[in-house]
Image (cartoon, rainbow, N blue to C red):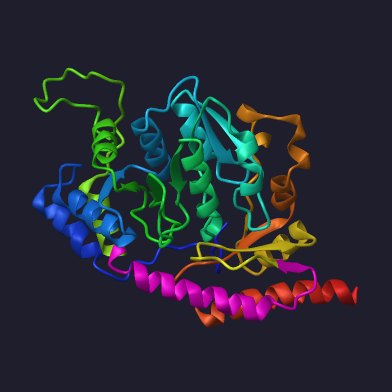
Amino acid sequence: MSYRYPVSRPQFGGRELELLSEAVTSGWVSSQGPFVAEFEERFAAWTGRSHGVACSSGTTALTLALRALGVGPGDEVIVPEFTMVASAWAVTYTGARPVFVDCGDDLNLDVSRLEQRITGRTRVIMPVHVYGRRCDMDAVMRLAREYNLRVVEDSAEAHGVAPVGDIACYSLFANKIITAGEGGVCVTDDPHLAWQMAHLRGMAFSPEHDFVHKKLAYNFRMTNLQAGVALAQLEQADQFLAARKQIEAYYDEGLADVPGLTLMPPRDVLWMYDVLAEQREELREHLAAQGIETRLFFQPMSRQPMYYDEGWERLRAADFGRRGLYLPTHVGLTRADQDAVIGAVRDFYRSRRAA
């Protein structure tokens, strides 16, 4: 179905075509092209980190981070219940076991429940900054230091949230704050970890390139084509974040007093504007009929078939998953577009009250 007001749309208003064309005309289209290293350096600097490692997706970024930290079979990694399944899959891909922690009011990992999930096998804590809300990293880092654990931040939805863990991983998928269509990037201050991630993403070739590979690695490389687009997007990142903050404020103002709708806590950066809705499915049908796309909240990891736990329905993550949705959120959204969305939501609940 084509929507007049899609939930997400990439914004290409900078040098994307210029840099993409330069990559094509130069012949440097593979991962060996110069835009890759330039993007890594500039993205790392933008986040306040020393090293960047570009790769093929946010999922592969998480996988590389865990592998670089030595995570493998027999290890455990703490992951939020409320997240996209890729967070947990990255752990499983290494042979380790994800251990889930329920969410708090802000949808992020409930740090008050974190310590009780730490065991002698725990190696890494993976906080996720859900929908652009920064997890309580002070508490996470305090426990990580106490138990000698490493921290990998899943920042797929949180470009602009300053990282503090050992490695932070970002997605560059088409619906993210900045995009390369597909892609991901890891940032760290540790040169050894950066080298390991770069080594693993590129099939663990030796310096001699002699086709002797001493460890199991991956082809998780980013192309020069993607890196050119990512560079152009990065040049606009601060502008995008400012525009998204205005979108958030306008939704807050327009939806604050709607009976049946619960606004969520403020976001550190706006990825998607999320709400809790009574009669959610009926609301979605009403909005869809007017060309307005919505998306559902994540479901608990313990509901997923590969991680199934029969107690998943009692989780707070499950309650949020049953009630939540997010509204169109992208830089191209105009005030008139938002007025249409806000008006349609208000009309829905007004009609229900009148009935």
Reply above or below: 147 against 246.
Answer: above
Does residue 213 appear to the left or right of 97 in the view shown?
left
Q: Which of 224 and 252 is in front in this view?
A: 252
Is 107 on the left-hand or right-hand side of 262? Answer: left
Dominant secondary structure (helix, strand or loop) of the stretch shown in magenta: helix
> Is residue 299 in view?
yes
Name the residue located 50 percent from the left edge and 36 percent from the top edge: 147
Magenta-colored span: 234-262
Give coordinates of residue 281: x percent, y percent: 75, 57
Residue 321 versus residue 308 in the image, above or below: below
> What is the total number of numbered labels drawn onto the structure image?
0
Q: Which residue lies furthest to the right in this view?
A: 355
Is 333 or 264 nearer to us in this picture? 264
Give the residue drawn at x 19%, y 60%.
19
Question: Which image quadrant: the N terminus?
Answer: bottom right
Residue 63 lies, with reference to residue 3, above or below; the image says: above
Question: Left or right of 254: which side holds 147?
Answer: left
Residue 223 lies, in percent from the top left, at 24, 45
Res. 301 in view: no
Residue 133, image quadrant: bottom right
At x 16% / y 53%, what residue is drawn?
23
Name the residue located 28 percent from the left edge and 70 percent from the top edge. Answer: 14
Q: Position of residue 255 (x, y in %)?
A: 68, 76
Is residue 223 shown in magenta? no
For the C terminus, the image quarter is: bottom right
* Image-quadrant location for residue 284: bottom right
Q: Where is residue 100 in the image (x, y as percent from the top left)?
A: 61, 36
